[in-house]
Image (tube, rainbow, N blue to C red):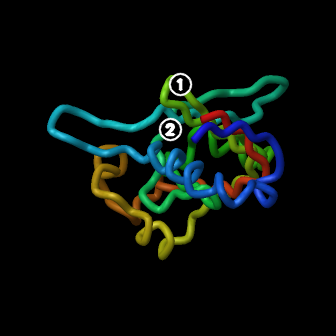
Amino acid sequence: MSIYYMGSLADLPQEFTEEVNNFVQKGIPVFTETGVESHTVMLGTKQDQHVRLSVINLLQDSKLWGIYMQTNRNSQKVKNLLACNTAEIAITNGFGYVVLECSGEVIEDDQRKKEKWEEWMTEFHPEGPLSADYVLLHFKPHAIRAML
């Protein structure tokens, strides 16, 4: 199926929803013996008068309607989101893409941090899900550009 769509996520035609959601979920890393497999995922946040891009890993519960990632409490991503809660997430496989315009929030709640914890995060937060440095970022898309 070929998809070209630009507009509100709420108005995304039903026949496109499943394919776009599947594409978004391919941004979730799959760890294999030969390395990590996933589409490339970029986060754009506003920093001063320009956009700051970061390569990110999506967490397992990420879907078209709600995307999660982990980061360090002192990261530039957190500072940018606290200053301006809008962001764009771009996912590509080199041939097609989905760009989601989102509102974002920083989650510091211990219960939610435990719920979203994934074992690979130990490399960045050795203290585990209650690490003082570990926070979640939650993005709620409201507009989408897709070409698949």
Vertical comparison of 83 with 15: above or below: above
Q: Nearer the N terminus, badge 1 or badge 2?
A: 2
Residue at horizontal 55%, vertical 58%?
63
Residue at horizontal 64%, vertical 60%?
65
Name the residue that disc number 1 marks.
95
* Mark 2: amino acid: Ile
Cα separation between marks 1 and 2: 19 Å
Q: Nearer the viewer, residue 134 or 139?
A: 139
The label shown at residue 56 is: 2
Q: Position of residue 54 (x, y in %)?
A: 57, 31
Residue at horizontal 53%, vertical 35%?
41
**Relative to 99, 74 lies left or right:** left
Q: Residue furthest front?
A: 1
Residue 45: quadrant of the picture: top right
Q: Nearer the viewer, residue 88 or 6?
A: 6
Q: Are marks 1 and 2 in contact (CB under 8 Å)?
A: no
* Mark 1: amino acid: Phe
The label shown at residue 145 is: none
Q: Residue furthest bottom?
A: 111
**Relative to 56, 86 lies left or right:** right
